[in-house]
Structure formats: C-alpha cells, structure tokens
Image (spheres, rainbow, N blue to C red):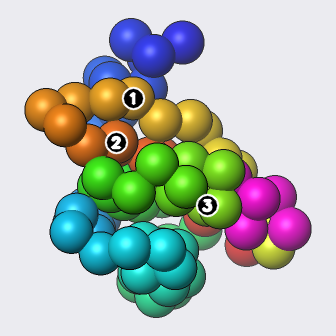
Amino acid sequence: MSEAIAAITADKVIDARGTACPGPLLEAKKGIGQVKVGQIIEIKSNDKGSRKDIAAWAGKVGHEFLGFVEADGHDRIMVRRKK
C-alpha cells in the first residue's frame, strides 16, 4: 500500500513540518477547501500524531483518508476531498 501512496501526486501540498499538534490538522482543514471534490491534498508532517488525527478528521467529515508514507524524516499524509 505504501508504494501506491508514495506514487500519488497531490493536487495541493501543505508543508506542516515543524508544527506540533494540532497545527498539521488545522492546515489540512484549510487546505481541503482549496481543492475541488475528487482532488487530493498531501500534508507533510513530522508530528507522528498527525497520522491518526488527520485520519480521524477525514472520516468524521466525510473525506477519504488515503494513508501515509514516511519520507526523509516526515510523513506524507494523503486525503481526497469527497464533498
């Protein structure tokens, strides 16, 4: 699965590295509104809590959490806008 995630090219990349929780989640919430339905945002985060925080948020509000992959000391977290 991680190879498939790594191969995704996001429509918008949000660099939230260096911000602690809930920074990456707040950036994801802002970023999702800047793409069209069906498009993907990538959140770069080095806060390990972001993995589950963003997954939980996406599920709660109806977006699709595609997963994450580790890259160069940070996570690339992918979410597809569903509405």
In this figure, which residue is indicated by the disc labeled 3? Answer: 54
What is the number of callouts on the image?
3
Check contact, mark 1 vs mark 2: CB within 8 A.
Answer: yes
Mark 3 element type: helix
Looking at the image, residue 33 lies above or below residue 59:
below
Disc assigned to residue 43:
none
Looking at the image, residue 31 lies above or below residue 56:
below
Q: Residue at x 81, y 73 (%)?
A: 61
Q: Position of residue 17 (x, y in %)?
A: 22, 63
> Which residue type does callout 1 highlight?
Val
> Which residue type does callout 3 highlight?
Ile
Left or right of 27? Residue 80 is right
Q: Residues within 10 Å of mark 3 (few under 14, many from 20)?
A: many
Quick one: 44 or 8, which is closer to the camera?
44
Disc assigned to residue 69:
1
In this figure, which residue is indicated by the disc labeled 2? Answer: 75
Q: Would residue 56 be counted in the magenta stretch?
A: yes
